[in-house]
Image: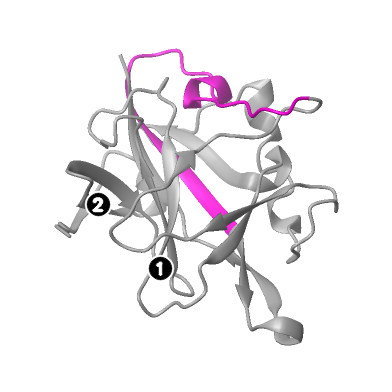
Amino acid sequence: MNVCLNNRIFSKFCAASLAVVVLFFKVTVQAQDLELIKTKTIDGLYIGITGSKFSTNDTPTNDKLNFGIWRTATNNQAIVYIPTALEYIYQLELIDTNGVALPKTELGKKIGVKFLDLEPSFAIDNGFKLARERAMDEPSWGGRYLFFPTRAGYGGQATYSPEDLFEIKRSGNYMLRIHFQIIARTGLGQDETAHVVRFPALDYRLVKQ
């Protein structure tokens, strides 16, 4: 695996938040380079985001981003659960080069309003849906769309871009800031328990032409 890890400080973004360090790495999967911006590792797990073309360079604001959940060699538990209901799925904001958060659309306002109310459970009928996922080993890729909430009354899934969630009226550079959370399993059998894992903010650079 070809891993290139660099710290990038986006000094033009989020001046009030003391500049955020973003981790970038590239991995070759089936002869194709996959670039990811990744969160810090918690409990042996981390999350990475890439554009639809597996590239992080000049990702447009109307792109349907992908994400994946990865595990380190020290983590033996690969099964995790992701909340898929809008209210629980993420906390997110889009920030311009002046550090100003853009207003959200009506759809965007629904995302993450109950983020801190997520309870550790494996159930799917407790007011929000959970998607069962397998955290990937390096190197591998089996990610899914970042914005994928299921539409009520339909069997399929709706996918959205940042432009569906934010009122982006001007061309320029933006930073999509996301707080992810998942439910992880520990133990086996009757000793198995669940706990919520909340990751530090991940910042992903976007461009509106």
- The residue lying toward the viewer, choosing from 139 and 57, is 139
Which residue is found at the position 79% from the left and 59% from the top?
123
Identified by mark 2, the residue type is Phe
Is 174 inside the magenta-drawn segment? Answer: yes
Q: Are marks 1 and 2 in contact (CB under 8 Å)?
A: no
Please state the horizontal and vertical placement of residue 204, each as a whole percent of the image: 36, 41
- Report the span colored magenta: 154-181
- The residue lying toward the viewer, choosing from 114 and 48, is 48
- The residue lying toward the viewer, choosing from 140 and 14, is 140
Is 30 inside the magenta-drawn segment? Answer: no
Q: Is residue 79 left or right of residue 44?
A: right
Examine the rendered structure and indicate whether residue 198 appears above or below residue 93: below
Q: Which quarter of the rendered picture does the N terminus lie within?
A: bottom left
The answer to whether residue 19 of the structure is visible from this angle is no
Please state the horizontal and vertical placement of residue 10, each as a whole percent of the image: 26, 45
User: Residue beneath label 1, please?
Assistant: 41
Examine the rendered structure and indicate whether residue 131 appears above or below residue 135: above
Q: Which quarter of the rendered picture does the C terminus lie within?
A: top left
Which residue is found at the position 25% from the left and 44% from the top?
35
Which residue is found at the position 59% from the left and 46% from the top?
91
What residue occupies the far right of the structure in this picture?
Answer: 126
Crowd rating for badge 1 (residues with CA inside 10 Å; few <14, some 14–19, many 20+): some
Please state the horizontal and vertical placement of residue 189, each as a whole percent of the image: 72, 82
User: Residue beneath label 2, please?
Assistant: 24
**Residue 47 in which image quadrant:** bottom left
Secondary structure at numbered mark 1: loop
Secondary structure at numbered mark 2: strand
Examine the rendered structure and indicate whether residue 137 appears above or below residue 51: below
